[in-house]
Image: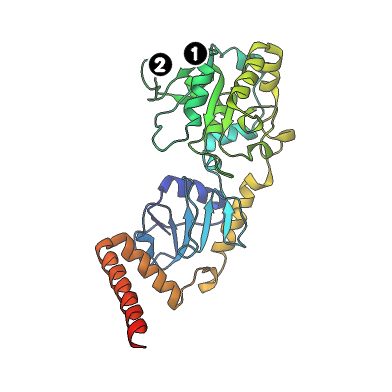
Amino acid sequence: MAVVDADFGMVEAILKMVADKYDFEFTAERDADYVFHSVGGMDVLKYPGVRIFVTGENVSPNFGISDYAMAFDKFAFGDRYIWLPLIKLYGKAYASLTSPRPPVEQACSLKTGFCAYVMSNTKNSAPERIRIFDLLTNYKPVSSGGRWRNNTGGPVADKLAFQLKHRFVIAFENTSWPGYLTEKFAEAAEANAVPIYWGDPGVGELFNPRAFINCHKFSSFEAVVEEIKRVDSDERIYRQFLSEPWFPNGIEPSCLRNETFAAFLSNIFDQEGDGAYRRNRGRWGLKNEQRLYTMSHRPFLHALILLRNRWRKLRRGFINRFFN
């Protein structure tokens, strides 16, 4: 097993789902039978083994390179693909979604602040993340515990402890895309706050709509703020939110269960010989990989090849026009 241009901790978290069935040996050698890789580069092309794409970013897999993929997009592709939202790999936070919620009185006794927001980077980030903060601040001060607009005396050292003290937590992804669901919702849930969520438009199909504020249900962020005001100003309604299970009827959906991902991985690892390969390893597949590798590792050579091909095309056009 090799890990190339991917987060090793993420791969470990994925393999935990089948740890009772297989023993894995990691290697840096290129003859690894299986290769986990991500968006970090094209070094994976040096590895001929079965390739499995994983990602914590909102990036779609390239099945010309990868045999299998575990990513955010919501689509089906035979046995080659499975939706794996990053939220599933945050073990402790995710466990809070499947566990009974603590007594409401216990949760409320810790809530000394209104709303928490931990954000540090707005570069290449959705403007909605700033807009919700500005609108909500007009109602009550929002505790900003990240590096961005920090008003807590510096970035908080313990995000969970910080969020535990607040009635609401803003849980906004850095972009909105179907299936793009990261740890933010689970971390707000772990703090027993009411998550104010924006990101995956389909989040309401997974989680109990009576347990959080789903921004995608509202026509505007102004309407979202009005809903927050309604919940915040009525203690009975607020406590009802805290008493609801995170999943509808308290049942974890099958698409998020460990056994679903274990079955996907077992299908890969149980195939013998070349049976697990899915990518094109023939002439055209290898040519495509060679082109991609040249683009990534030898950009000057790639530019020369493009110029050569362009010149050949122009020359053929000239000859056909004036000599045929």
Residue 288, by quadrant, is bottom left
Residue 207, by quadrant, is top right
Left-right relation of 71 to 232: left
- Label 1 sits on what residue type? Pro
Left-right relation of 302 to 140: left
Q: Secondary structure at mark 2?
A: loop
Instruction: Find disc 2 in the rendering and name its residue.
Output: 151
Quadrant placement of the C terminus: bottom left
Q: Is residue 30 visible?
A: no
Residue 83 pos. (x, y %)? 58, 50
Residue 12 pos. (x, y %)? 46, 48
In the displayed structure, 287 sits above or below 216; it is below
In front: 305, or 279?
A: 305
In the displayed structure, 182 sits above or below 53; it is above
Q: Is residue 230 visible?
A: yes
- Label 2 sits on what residue type? Asn
In the displayed structure, 77 sits above or below 324; it is above
**Residue located 28% across and 69% down the image:** 307
Instruction: Find disc 1 in the rendering and name its residue.
Output: 141
Residue 226 pos. (x, y %)? 63, 18
Q: In whole angstroms, how far apart are the C-alphas of marks 2 and 1?
A: 10 Å
In front: 11, or 229?
A: 229
In front: 112, or 303?
A: 303
Earlier residue among tags 2 and 1: 1
